[in-house]
Structure formats: structure tokens, C-alpha cells
Image: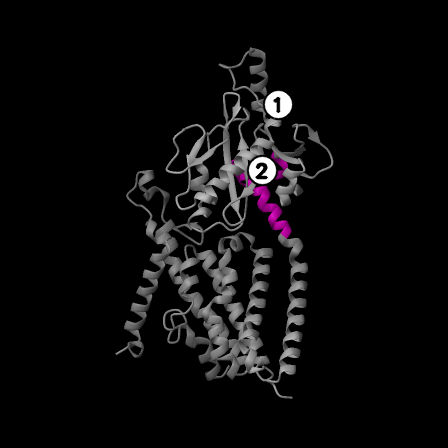
Amino acid sequence: MNKNSNLYIVIYSTVMVVVVATLLAVAALALKSRQDANILNEKKEAILASLSLQGQNYDEVIEAFVVNEKGEKMEGADPIQLLFDLPTAFAENTLPVFQAADGRIVVPVSGVGLWGPMWGYVALEKDMNTISGIVLDHAGETPGLGAEVATRKHQAMYKGKTIFEGEEFVSVTLRKGGAKDPNHEVDAISGGTKTSDGVTAMLKTSLGAYLPLLKVSAVAPCCAECAEATECETNKVANNE
Amino acid sequence: MSNKNLKYLTGPFSANNPVIVQILGICSALAVTVQLKPAIVMALSVTAVTAFANLVMSLLRKGLPSRIRIIVQLVVIATLVILVDQVLKAFVYDVSKQLSVYVGLIITNCIVMGRVEAFALGNGPWASFLDGIGNGLGYGLILVIIAFFRELFGAGTLYGFRVIPESWYIAEGGFYANNGLMLFPPMALILCGCIIWVHRSKNKDLQEK
């Protein structure tokens, strides 16, 4: 048969495509469980990293639960599984919360950058106001520009920022040209304006969804602002545990 | 192994090196050489892809319609790269995250297609396989050399282990600071140029008149 006849080429390419498709499908299915386990592990590590508890055993230090839009605990949903599809979780008001043994909580955030989805984990101190740590990640922001949000250097700037001004929720804003407000702003990424805007919007909407929970769980900072000494004592006991 | 086959394997290490003699695959050599670990994983991945792409194309070469030759090559290479990517994601997830898009970009690495087109289509499977391994390792050798210097002087570590003591650093009261330029791609290009310089000064027959 003539190797350059149309019929030969059509048959040749058809067979090739079928063989390749089968091969890739088999490989993808065979490796899927391992890959999913890796992704799950990465999410747990990210939650621990936002709390600066790297290397600790996730199952020992984290208690996970799900709340609805009113901040009430819900039964039936697996918090860690919700992380695999955060946009849907937020849309359906099934909000996963990860509480550390010391009372700090981690809430996931989900949004979009310039090129695709972004997500992250925000750890809040017991006052439910001060950011204790943050981990941000993205699917495909521009390396060297927008992708800088996923670096430790950028994420270190969030530590100690507060998301409330008095009683009002203001979130944290990424300010182009450098942060002006020392409490609620961090430097935006130069060359990554769209990504920075995406992070600002992501923090605002995602943290906003947790407001009822944050207001309920907030523990007043100890001593000076404590109305009653007994409340302060209970806090101290809780801290030591 | 016959002398001729041995030459297919070892030729690309020095005299016919794909990176510093043929100047192929420079892009990824700049991108993944900040640290040794991703450089080594990248080198092994490219070696696997070149070797098996050469092997498969050499086996197919007799029945291959020359009019769709390039497309078939691309399909074979792309399949192998996707397999490598899947395996990395399953077994060395952290490295696969570090390499990110560059694993996918092995498809566009000129070394792979260059060897298939120039060698595998005209030689037997065993020789092609060896040629693929040789070229992959030749590429990897340069990657490892560049990554060695970049990680040592850029971060003070090798393969993640601290080599330059913490106490030497200015922050700890010492006298030493990491060279930040080492972490950026231009330095990889400069190092690559230095390697070519040293290599050509030792190999007079490579010098252009």
C-alpha cells in the first residue's frame, strides 16, 4: 500500500489516536488516587502553614467543621472535601472552618486573578480580627508578576493586619504604590495589578461570608479591654491548654 | 556494547552536547536551575522523554507516512510528556509543583524533536534509544552544573542542605551574603556562557574560525 495515500494516512492517524487515548486514559485513572492524596495533603499543609504550625500532625491540631451563612454549625458536609471546589462551597453557603487547638481559626478564601482561579487560607487570631498568617495560591498567574502573591515574602506582609475597623468589616486591601493604612493595607504587586485586585476582592467576599461566625466567636483581647476579670481568667485557662 | 553504540551514548556528554554545542534547550536550562533538586528531576524527565520518543519513532519509522511525520512525532512526544507529568504529580508532587509549566514545555524542547528528526528516523531502535539517553543526560549534565553554582551561591545550600554556615551571614553577625543575581535567569545564561567558554577552550576543534 502506498504510504502517502490518503486512505493510509487516515487509517494510520486513527489508529494512533485511539492507541494514545487509551494509554493516557489508563495512566490517568491508575494514578488518580495517588495524585488526589497528594493534593489533599498539600491542602492540609497549607492550612498548617497559615497557622505557622508546619510539620505538625494535621489530625491532632486541627478541628474542622462547616458553618452556614449565619455562622451556625452544620452537619453532613466534609470540610476538607469542600476545599476541592471552593466556589461551589461558597455559592451553597457550606463554609468550611479549621480551628486550631489554641483557638485560632483558618478560613479558606476563593476568587479569581488575571488568568484563572486563586485560593488561599487566612488564619485569624482568637480576636477574629488580626491576621495570624496567610497562604495564597493560584492556578496560572504570570510568573514573576502576579504569581508573586504565592511567595512567602508577599504573604508575610499580611501578618498582624486587622480586618475590622472598630465594628466595621473593612478586609485587607492591596494598595498600588505601597500600603498607606498600616492596619488594613499591604503593598500590591507591581506589574500584577489585576492579580492584586483579585486578591483584594477575594479577601473581601470570602472573609465577608464568614462575618456572622467571626462576630460570634471573637474573644476580646485579654486584660485591659476585658470587661470582667472572670472572662479574662477563662481566656487565660483556655490559652494554656 | 559496541564502540559505535557507546559513542551514541557518550558523544552528547561533551563533543556533541545538546546545550553547549548545539545550543538547544536553553529556555528550560535557565528556568529550572535555581536549585539542584528540580534540575535533576527535569534532567531525568527529559532523558526519559528523549529516550522513549527516539525508541518509539525508530520503531515506527518504516510504516510512517512522511507527509504526517511531524504530527506523529508531536503526538508521541506529547503523550510521553503527559505520562511523565502524571507520574511526577503522583510520586514527587512538591517537585512537580516547582517545575510547574516546564514539564509540559518539554514538548517544545528542541532537543527531543531534534533527535527524533535527525537520528531516530534513520537509525535502529537500540541505537536511537541510546542516543536519546545520551542527549538527555548531556542536557541534564549542564543543568546540574548550572544549578550547582546557582544554588550554592544564590541560597548557600546544595540539594536543600545547608553548605554555607548560618553564622557566616551578615544577619547573624558574619561577613557573607547570598548573591541575589544567582536566583535570576540572566545569571544562568552567564553561567551557561562560561561553561561554553571553558568547554571550547579545551576542545579546539569546536572553535569557529
**Which residue is at 64% across, 36% downward?**
A96
Name which residue lies at 38% across and 60% down.
Answer: B146
Q: Residue lying farthest left?
A: B209
Q: Residues within 10 Å of mark 2 (few under 14, many from 20)?
A: many
Q: Which mark is residue A216?
A: 1
Label for residue A108? Answer: 2
- The verdict on residue A11 being magenta is no
* Colour treatment of the image: one colour
| Magenta stretch bounds | A36-61
Relative image position of residue A223 (x, y in whole percent): 51, 15
Q: Nearer the viewer, residue A46 or A72?
A: A72
In which quadrant is the C terminus of chain B drawn?
bottom left
Is A37 one of the magenta-colored residues? Answer: yes
Q: Position of residue A200 (x, y in %)?
A: 49, 37
Q: Is residue A3 left or right of residue B138?
A: right
Which secondary structure dominates the residues rendered in magenta? helix
Rendered location of residue B84, percent (x, y): 57, 63
